[in-house]
Amino acid sequence: LDFLDTPKNKVLLSELGNRLLDGDINSRKVLFAQQLLKLGTFAFINQILRESKNHSLSREVVEEELAMRLATEDVEKLFDTVVAWARYGEIFDYDPDGEMLKLSA
């Protein structure tokens, strides 16, 4: 996510990492969301949600899409991880009862 750099076995905060730590909770979430959407999986899910009716899809549909693109991954675990990270960044909302993923308002 570009918050850290690791030159010569050292761990250093990047300028972006410093901005993350210096910000309040809302600015942290915005910055975190911006960085997540630079990652292929998050960008892809964001795109298919934007293209879907009501900007929402069932868990089953999203997992099928992920399985087609990432055949060697455990898509259930990947879905759960994506949802957890995206909920923190307020990119996606997930209704576990209805098993629906949607864009955050």
Image (cartoon, helix red, strand yellow):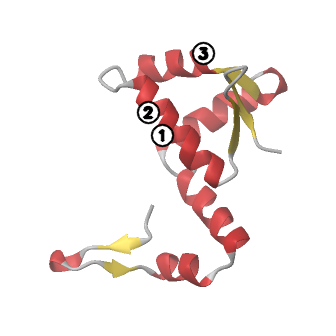
Q: Position of residue 27 (x, y in %)?
A: 69, 72
**Residue of label 2:** 78
Label 2 SS:
helix
Left or right, residue 69 beside residue 20: left
State the residue in front, 38 or 67: 67
Of the image marks 3 and 2, the number of the one nearer the N terminus: 3
Image quarter of the C terminus: top right
User: Quick one: label 1, few (<14), some, or many (20+) residues within 10 Å?
Assistant: few
Residue at the image point whose x is 70% and y is 30% from the top: 49
Amino acid type at circle 1 is Thr
State the residue in front, 42 or 97: 97
Depicted 90 relative to depicted 63: above or below: below
Left or right, residue 38 beside residue 31: left
**Residue of label 1:** 81
Real-space Cα separation, disc 3 to disc 2, in angstroms:
14 Å
User: Quick one: label 3, few (<14), some, or many (20+) residues within 10 Å?
Assistant: few
Of the image marks 1 and 3, the number of the one nearer the N terminus: 3
Residue at the image point whose x is 84% and y is 25% from the top: 54
Q: Are marks 3 and 2 in contact (CB under 8 Å)?
A: no
- Which image quadrant is residue 59 in? top right
Amino acid type at circle 2 is Leu
Image quarter of the N terminus: bottom left
Q: Are marks 2 and 1 in contact (CB under 8 Å)?
A: yes
Q: Position of residue 74 (x, y in %)?
A: 36, 25
- Which image quadrant is residue 93 in? top right
Q: Which mark is residue 61?
A: 3
Residue at the image point whose x is 54% and y is 80% from the top: 21
State the residue in front, 2 or 73: 73
Label 3 SS:
helix
